[in-house]
Structure formats: structure tokens, C-alpha cells
Image: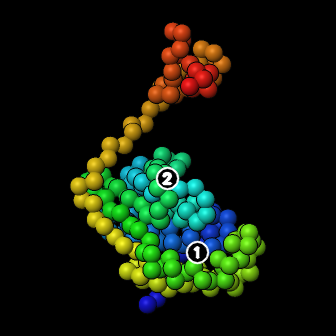
Amino acid sequence: MEKFKIPEWAFEFHGHKCPFMPIGYRMGTLAMKKLGVSKSLNHEMHVFSEMGIGHPQGCMQDGIMAATAATFGKGLIEKLYYGKVAAIFWYPEKGGVRIFLKNEFADSLAPHEFFKLRKKGIDPSDIPDDVRQDIIDMVLSASDEDLFEVTPLPDFQYTPVKGAFNKAKCEVCGEYVFERYLRVKDGKKICIPCSEY
């Protein structure tokens, strides 16, 4: 099998070379293939990341965003904080697909020198290039079938939040607030920090 290729800019965006951004990139690429769609130029795909906070889950989410353009900035990726290496990808009129990193593949990476160094507290960018490249090559050389379990979710429903441009000034601090985030306290329209909720 030919090695999967990831653009260098995706590693630059992520900030370091590690195996997890490429896993996320491959996950997002596979989701687009399964749904028959391309990158979300506007606000099409929505991703429900089952990942949580911390290594390696954040790295995978950067890969998903780089592959799909379903970004946090566009409000197209949402964290569910399940702590799983999985995500649901939804696209209008296409339904959804859930992709999970297979336990067997995760187990095959676990004994690698990369993890021994990470467990000692060495940051990914400080791990020798050849060690990082070796584990990245393991990810890029695997087949989609080796990496992922894919579950079609044709009936998955989601209603995206409508974009809004209406805003008002908080009657306490005077800063603009988009209307859906205004709260009413003592008859005044105020922002969340000023509302003390």
C-alpha cells in the first residue's frame, strides 16, 4: 500500500510532529470519503468529537480540522468530553458517520519509543526527529481498515445553530454582546460575566 500523504502545512498548523495529528487528519479524510463530500468551505460539516482534553486527543482534533475545514472558529466542531478516540461527522442531507480508532492499532503504537519518551515528560518537539518520523510512518503506512472502525449513521439528525449578526450593548459594562448571549438581570440586558451566572 502506498503511504498516505499529509501536507506539511498541517504539521505547521499543529505546531509539532507527532502521530496523533495524522490520525485525526486521516479520520477526517475518511469521513469525507464515506459521506461523499469535500472540505467545508462554509458551514456544512459538523463534527462531534468524542475526545476530551489533553494528549493525544487535542492533537487528533487539529488533524480533523485540517482535513475537513470543520473548525472551532467556524463553530463546526464540538467536544463531547467522552475521552474516546472517536468522532461523529455529520453533513446536511448525507447523514453521519462515526469513526473510532481501533484498539488494536492503538495497542500496536503503545510500545514505541515515542511513548516511552512522552511518559518521561519529554515534549513531542523535543523527541528526536527519527523517532517521531518512525511512528508517523506507522500511521501513514496503515490502511484505513487497520486504523479505523467505521459506523454509518444515515439517520443521524442535527440542526445547526443559525448565524446571527444582531448585537446590543451590555447595560453594565457597555461592551457589545451578540443577542443570544444576553441575559436579563434586574430588568437590564447584560452580558454573561456581568450577570454573574
Q: As rendered, which of 3 and 104 lies closer to the eye?
A: 104
Q: As rendered, which of 168 and 156 lies closer to the eye?
A: 156
Q: Looking at this view, name the residue that lies furthest to the left.
A: 155
Q: How many marks?
A: 2
Quarter of the image with the C terminus is: top right
Q: Position of residue 82 (x, y in %)?
A: 46, 55
Measured along the vertical axis of the image, is residue 27 above or below residue 173? below
Residue 42 visible within the image:
no
Q: Residue at x 40, y 79 (%)?
A: 144
Give the number of the disc on residue 155. Answer: none
Check disc 2 and give the amino acid type. Answer: Tyr
Among the two numbered marks 1 and 2 on one chain, the one whose residue lies closer to the N terminus? 1
Q: Position of residue 122 (x, y in %)?
A: 75, 71
Residue 15 visible within the image:
yes
Mark 2 burial class by Cα count in 10 Å: few <14, some 14-19, many 20+: few
Q: Secondary structure at mark 1?
A: loop
Give the number of the disc on residue 19. Answer: 1
Q: Position of residue 91 (x, y in %)?
A: 33, 55
Q: Position of residue 100 (x, y in %)?
A: 41, 68
Image check: 170 left or right of 166? right
Q: Secondary structure at mark 2?
A: loop
Q: Residue at x 28, y 49 (%)?
A: 157
Question: Which residue was labeled with disc 2?
Answer: 81
Q: Looking at this view, name the residue that lies furthest to the top.
A: 187
Which quadrant holds residue 146?
bottom left
Q: Residue at x 35, y 63 (%)?
A: 98
Mark 1 burial class by Cα count in 10 Å: few <14, some 14-19, many 20+: many
Q: Are marks 1 and 2 in contact (CB under 8 Å)?
A: no
Check disc 1 and give the amino acid type. Answer: Pro
Image check: 2 left or right of 54? left
Q: CA distance from mark 1 to mark 2?
A: 21 Å
